[in-house]
Image: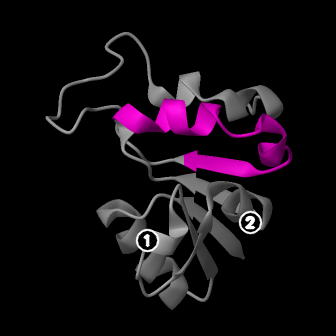
Amino acid sequence: MKLGILGTGKVALLLSGAWRNAGHEIKLGSRDPSSKNLRFEVTSLADCVSGADVVVNAILGSAALETISAMDADLFAGKTVIDVSNATTPRFELTYSDSSLAARLPCRRRCPARTS
């Protein structure tokens, strides 16, 4: 499976290593891919999403909403999006005390609601 992970921090790298070891194709997305020197392919955020079967949001919670909202929501059409970020600031304060980050992500509008 092709996994696109938005972010290049500790969570993104931990997940990338485990999923690559499990046989998945991994691509990381960054706002500035040329500044990264990692063991994984790093592309723009848009290229990361467009080439993935599954998209994982591993961007710092306090920056994720602004970063993903700046992207074309159509990129996420038909994609499974997994949000593993915590809606906290770098000082571990809650960003959204009344809801979750995932509930606010614009890509939700392109994905039909799933019920169990």
The segment highlighted magenta reads 62-82
Residue at figure coordinates x 57%, y 55% from the top left: 56
Disc 2: which residue: 52
Residue at 20%, 39% (x, y): give it: 90
- Indicate the quadrant where residue 2 lies: bottom right
Side (left or right) of 88 relative to 77: left
Question: What amino acid type is highlighted by mark number 2?
Answer: Ala
Identified by mark 1, the residue type is Ser
Query: In which image quadrant can residue 42 be found?
Result: bottom right
Spot occupied by residue 36 in the image (x, y as percentages of width and height): 42, 74
Q: CA distance from mark 1 to mark 2?
A: 22 Å
Instruction: Work out whether residue 45 or residue 6 is closer to the camera in this orientation and state it.
Output: 45
Side (left or right) of 11 relative to 27: left
Q: For this view, does 62 lie left or right of residue 28? A: left
Q: Earlier in the sequence, mark 1 or mark 2?
A: 1
- Local secondary structure at mark 1: helix
- Estimate the x, y position of residue 107 in percent, counting from the top left: 70, 34
Q: Nearer the viewer, residue 116 or 49?
A: 49
Q: Residue at horizontal 56%, vertical 23%? A: 103
Q: Which residue is mark 1?
A: 35
Asked if the magenta segment contains residue 74, the reply would be yes
